[in-house]
């Protein structure tokens, strides 16, 4: 290694460098490797360059600080070759490095491909005080809340929570509410008005039934059509034999879109199907994604631009246009530098910091097809579209466009949301030929309804005026209609379903939905089956929906809270309900799984009862005295689950199933060998407190572990809440009425109607 000094530069000729080297007592941070990238050597991050066979002649220039004389920037040049060849080799190596990198965006941000001041291109990186590649500056801890028009505290940025959750907490505190972040992105707010739960943009008043109504694309399509909202012409196909319907549609329209009815985030979707072979591939992909319970939607492809309309409380609060990842040249920066600059901008945004622009093989190939490389310098104003995919996660930018959008599309979005009874907060994806022109049946389509929309892009758009959508969601709970009174139904809301949906409705009906349907009909409602497990019921001005054990009044955030152990521990402690007194969580896949299970089993031999549980599954009782069965259940749950295995010791093995409706216990199924006469009022009241403590749970089943009256000694009132089940099988409780509620379903409907009218 030789060094020469040129004013503030130190030139290091380093053809034989194999490890981190030092010249003139200054580390230069280079190591040899298979591909270009970042690696660890001598305890620091260094640039790894290809082997000497590929790059025999390397020269590094160290720029030194004028005051200290220590290097601050390193620039790597390829010597002994022409500028064009060097540029090609560096560009190819950089592209290979991106595809191999453990952290591609880290490489893009910390090692630049620059126009070499002495000709050609070069690699450049900043140097830290250890001689390695310098880290990026930390993301800002605080940013100004651009959506707040008057003076307000800075917004604290935390990477542990979603941006929507952080905004929700910020806006709630601005309104003087007490806020608790219970588990990941579950938020509980309290004020004199009461308590509310939130999960992202969903609250305890967001109907869980919308998960079916909006989440199932076929059902959503049916409901939208009945609101006279334009959707793409198409068919829903449930059986393999229905492929002929798709073929007929292809003969009628030149381009098709094929997608699963129950997919999300673009999974299983094929756009631009133009021939039979492509249709068969798209059909097979969609059917595989949909599974046995789903169906395949085949639609005419609509050409236009897309926008997300966020509707809150019957009004459009923001419109986001997604712009495909695009670079704009400045005449001096390479494509890699423009990409780096774009990622640094996104990294500073609380909404986009984890959604950086990445270069996959498809995008690298697109560059080559356009005759470009990562070292190409785009001219001033020259635009290059990295990819036409407009998903934020793939690098698209969000532009807040409410002021630029014709108000008629807002009317369309509001009508679309009203198609889902009870839904007040939703995202509506609309494609249109021109959003500045009035909406007409033939110039737009509603692509999708999202019942839990991401709204962070309205608060932190890449361009456009920020909008306070989260504030509108919070304000919704201050209105008299916060309990989701739905108003008068549309004249189309009970029109019988037509077309291909009849095949779905004729399938075997869900027993819990059937119980609700019969009870609502007995109470004077007109009931319509829209799916085997989903009904809509109308009586005068009242409209309601039931999906299995969920009603239109079952709140989504409440359901999520009941399924979160951390949140449940917090809420049950406040309610004075004993929950998870003795519990331990084990890793699902330890190396010594059998030994871990055996140690646990031996510690539990004296326990009156033991349960195991993974994820949101129902707890399973296990007998620690049966070694084989204990180990078998342990292994099975570890294979089935995605989180840790929860093992609990209980005071009793007697399981009481208590059905609670709007704060009242209406039915109890006692353990085998016991009757209602053995029931303890104290644990029934505990079940009522437990369900009542969770905002948005109208009907739920509480599982209580307790001995019967005759089994207890003295005044002992030991009980334990095992779980709350948010999808209660109501049909199993029909003959187990409790107290004054001998007619269980009549009590359920009476409570439901009273809540609808409030």
Image (tube, rainbow, N blue to C red):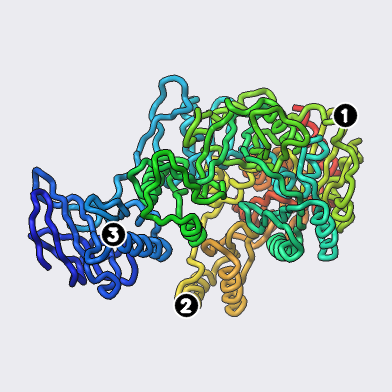
Where's the C terminus, which quadrant?
A: top right
Contact? badges 1 and 3 (CB < 8 Å): no
**397 sits left or right of 423 in the view:** left
Q: Which residue is identified by label 1?
A: 540
Contact? badges 2 and 3 (CB < 8 Å): no
Please tell me which of labels 1 and 3 falls first in the chain. Answer: 3
Q: Which residue is identified by label 2?
A: 595
Contact? badges 2 and 1 (CB < 8 Å): no
Q: Which mark is residue 83?
A: 3
User: Separation of disc 1 and disc 3 at Cα?
Assistant: 80 Å
- Mark 2 or 3: the one toward you: 3
- Mark 2 or 1: the one toward you: 1
- Percent x, y for residue 428? 66, 38
Viewer-nearest residue: 236 or 166? 236
- Percent x, y for residue 398? 52, 39
Q: Where on the picture, by quarter, is residue 487?
A: top right
Please tell me which of labels 2 and 3 falls first in the chain. Answer: 3
């Amino acid at each position: 290694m030789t060094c020469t000094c040129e004013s503030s530069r130190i030139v290091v000729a380093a053809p034989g460098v194999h490890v981190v080297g030092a010249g003139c007592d200054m580390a230069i941070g280079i190591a040899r490797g298979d591909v270009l990238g970042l690696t660890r050597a001598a305890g620091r991050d260094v640039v790894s360059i290809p082997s000497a066979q590929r790059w025999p002649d390397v020269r590094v220039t160290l720029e030194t600080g004028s005051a200290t004389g220590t290097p601050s920037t390193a620039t790597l040049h390829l010597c002994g070759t022409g500028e064009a060849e060097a540029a090609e080799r560096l560009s190819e190596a950089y592209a290979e490095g991106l595809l191999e990198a453990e952290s591609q965006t880290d490489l893009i941000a910390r090692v630049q491909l620059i126009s070499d001041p002495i000709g050609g291109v070069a690699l450049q990186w900043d140097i830290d005080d250890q001689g390695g590649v310098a880290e990026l500056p930390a993301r800002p801890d605080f940013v100004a809340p651009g959506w707040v028009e008057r003076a307000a505290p800075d917004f604290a940025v935390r990477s542990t929570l979603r941006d929507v959750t952080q905004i929700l907490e910020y806006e709630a505190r601005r309104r003087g509410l007490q806020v608790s972040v219970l588990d990941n992105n579950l938020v509980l707010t309290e004020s004199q008005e009461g308590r509310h739960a939130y999960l992202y943009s969903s609250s305890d008043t967001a109907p869980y039934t919308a998960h079916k109504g909006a989440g199932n694309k076929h059902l959503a399509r049916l409901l939208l059509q009945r609101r006279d909202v334009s959707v793409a012409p198409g068919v829903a196909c449930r059986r393999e034999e229905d492929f002929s319907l798709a073929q007929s549609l292809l003969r009628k329209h030149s381009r098709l879109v094929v997608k699963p009815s129950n997919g999300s985030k673009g999974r299983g979707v094929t756009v631009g199907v133009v021939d039979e072979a492509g249709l068969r591939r798209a059909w097979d992909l969609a059917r595989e994604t949909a599974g046995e319970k789903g169906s395949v939607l085949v639609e005419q492809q609509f050409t236009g631009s897309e926008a997300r309309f966020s509707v809150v409380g019957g009004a459009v609060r923001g419109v986001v246009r997604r712009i495909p990842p695009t670079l704009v040249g400045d005449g001096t920066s390479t494509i890699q530098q423009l990409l780096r600059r774009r990622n640094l901008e996104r990294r500073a945004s609380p909404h986009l910091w984890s959604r950086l622009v990445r270069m996959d093989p498809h995008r690298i190939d697109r560059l080559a097809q356009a005759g470009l490389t990562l070292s190409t310098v785009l001219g001033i104003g020259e635009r290059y579209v990295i990819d036409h995919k407009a998903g934020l996660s793939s690098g698209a930018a969000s532009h807040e466009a409410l002021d630029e959008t014709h108000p008629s599309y807002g009317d369309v979005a509001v009508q679309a949301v009203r198609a889902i009874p009870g839904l007040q907060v939703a995202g509506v994806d609309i494609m249109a030929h021109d959003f500045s022109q009035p909406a007409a049946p033939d110039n737009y389509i509603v692509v999708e309804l999202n019942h839990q929309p991401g709204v962070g892009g309205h608060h932190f758009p890449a361009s456009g005026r920020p909008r306070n959508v989260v504030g509108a969601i919070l304000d919704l709970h201050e209105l008299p209609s916060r309990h989701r009174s739905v108003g008068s139904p549309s004249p189309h809301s009970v029109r019988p379903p037509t077309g291909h949906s009849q095949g779905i409705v004729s399938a075997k009906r869900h027993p819990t939905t059937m119980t609700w349907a019969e009870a609502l009909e007995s109470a004077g409602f007109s009931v319509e089956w829209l799916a085997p497990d989903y009904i809509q019921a109308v009586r005068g001005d009242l409209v309601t929906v039931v999906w299995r054990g969920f009603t239109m009044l079952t709140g989504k955030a409440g359901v999520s809270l009941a399924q979160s152990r951390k949140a449940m521990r917090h809420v049950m402690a406040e309610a004075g309900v004993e929950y998870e007194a003795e519990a331990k969580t084990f890793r699902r896949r330890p190396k010594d799984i059998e030994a871990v299970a055996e140690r646990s089993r031996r510690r539990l031999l004296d326990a009156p009862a033991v349960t195991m549980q993974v994820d949101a599954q129902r707890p399973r009782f296990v007998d620690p005295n049966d070694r084989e069965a204990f180990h078998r259940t342990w292994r099975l749950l570890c294979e089935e689950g995605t989180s840790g295995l929860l093992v609990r010791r209980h005071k009793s093995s007697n399981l009481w199933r208590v059905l609670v409706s709007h704060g009242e216990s209406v039915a109890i199924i006692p353990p085998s060998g016991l009757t209602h006469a053995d029931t303890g009022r104290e644990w029934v009241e505990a079940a009522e407190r437990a369900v009542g403590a969770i905002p948005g749970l109208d009907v739920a089943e509480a599982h209580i572990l307790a001995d019967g009256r005759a089994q207890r000694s003295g005044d002992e009132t030991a009980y334990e809440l095992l779980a709350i089940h948010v999808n209660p099988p109501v049909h199993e409780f029909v003959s187990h009425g409790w107290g004054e509620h001998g007619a269980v379903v009549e009590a359920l409907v009476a409570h439901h109607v009273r809540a609808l009218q409030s």
